[in-house]
Amino acid sequence: MTATDAPQIGIIGLGQFGRFAAAHLAPYLEVVAYDPVLPEESIARVQLGSLAEAASCEFVMVSVPVLALRDALNAIGPYLQTGACVLDVCSVKIAPMRWLEEELPPDVDYLGTHPLFGPRSAGDDLEGHQVVLCPGRGRHAECVAEFLRMLGLYVIVTDAETHDRESARAQALAQYIGRALGPIEAPETGITTYAADLLREVEEIVGGDSWELFAAIQNLNPFAAAARAELRAGLDDLDARLESS
């Protein structure tokens, strides 16, 4: 399938992930992208359009920060076509899935997605990377999953609550630890270990994300606080055991 005989997808938001997604989708879909602040560099085979043009496509991917999602859904609502499918790409799922249900017109379908990768981790090769798909309203879940598998992605189909519960450990806790490691300086002499290098790599990955994204992952995931509390309890237990040794 090529973009000339494929459905249109509108991308709302050309931040880091929006540009990344547009570049990877353009060989297979006709991509119409909108952002109020246009990128400095053009994206091959991607048409820049108005909000109305991007939102009137058969598929619409809303690639904005999670706290901006609700406003974005309200903005595209008047332009959405009956039977269109709206997808989010947020790192949490319970709240965004509720907003998709509440804010979109009832004749518009929606799916929740969470790509477990980004420009830094995937680069030019999507093969083997994971994406979570949370079916919402409508009939598009199966065809979207098939398309994502065609791109080489491993698709995990689950519900929003399961996603957030498991993501509290798989993502929120890793982000929390990485942020905590930030102020700890690397050794100047080169003395290190493999385990220390892995921790530094986690810190570097997390440090590349905005504070807004980090705060959203922690505050909008209802299971994240419990995961952080369990970590702190484990650290306190280790200290107690060391003091008694």
Image (tube, rainbow, N blue to C red):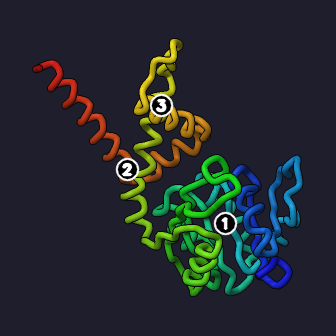
Residue 32 visible from this viewpoint:
yes
Q: If the image is split into quadrants, where does the C terminus sit? A: top left
Amino acid type, callout 2: Arg
Which mark is in front, 3 or 2?
3
Using the image, tell me which numbered label, if any, was put on residue 60.
Answer: none
Q: Secondary structure at mark 2?
A: helix
The image quarter containing residue 72 is: bottom right
Q: Secondary structure at mark 1?
A: helix
Question: What is the distance, in whole Å, between disc 3 and disc 2 at their CAs?
Answer: 21 Å
Question: What is the distance, in whole Å, between disc 1 and disc 3 at their CAs?
Answer: 41 Å
The image quarter containing residue 106 is: bottom right
Using the image, tell me which numbered label, if any, was put on residue 73.
Answer: 1
Question: How would you rate the neighbour count of disc 2 (Cα within 10 Å): few for under 14, some for 14-19, many for 20 or more?
Answer: some
The image quarter containing residue 204 is: top right
Q: Secondary structure at mark 3?
A: helix
Q: Earlier in the sequence, mark 3 or mark 2?
A: 2
Question: How would you rate the neighbour count of disc 1 (Cα within 10 Å): few for under 14, some for 14-19, many for 20 or more?
Answer: many
Q: If the image is split into quadrants, where does the N terminus sit? A: bottom right
Q: For mark 2, what is the residue?
A: 169
Q: For mark 3, what is the residue?
A: 197
Q: Position of residue 165 (x, y in %)?
A: 36, 58
Amino acid type, callout 3: Asp
Relative to residue 181, is residue 136 depicted above or below?
A: below
Q: Is residue 243 left or right of residue 21?
A: left
Amino acid type, callout 1: Leu
Q: Position of residue 184 (x, y in %)?
A: 47, 21
Image point 54% across, 64% down: which residue?
131
Q: Which residue, as the protein is rendered here, is positioned at the far left?
A: 244
Which mark is in front, 1 or 3?
3
Image point 60% across, 49% down: which residue?
121
Q: Is residue 96 left or right of residue 4?
A: left
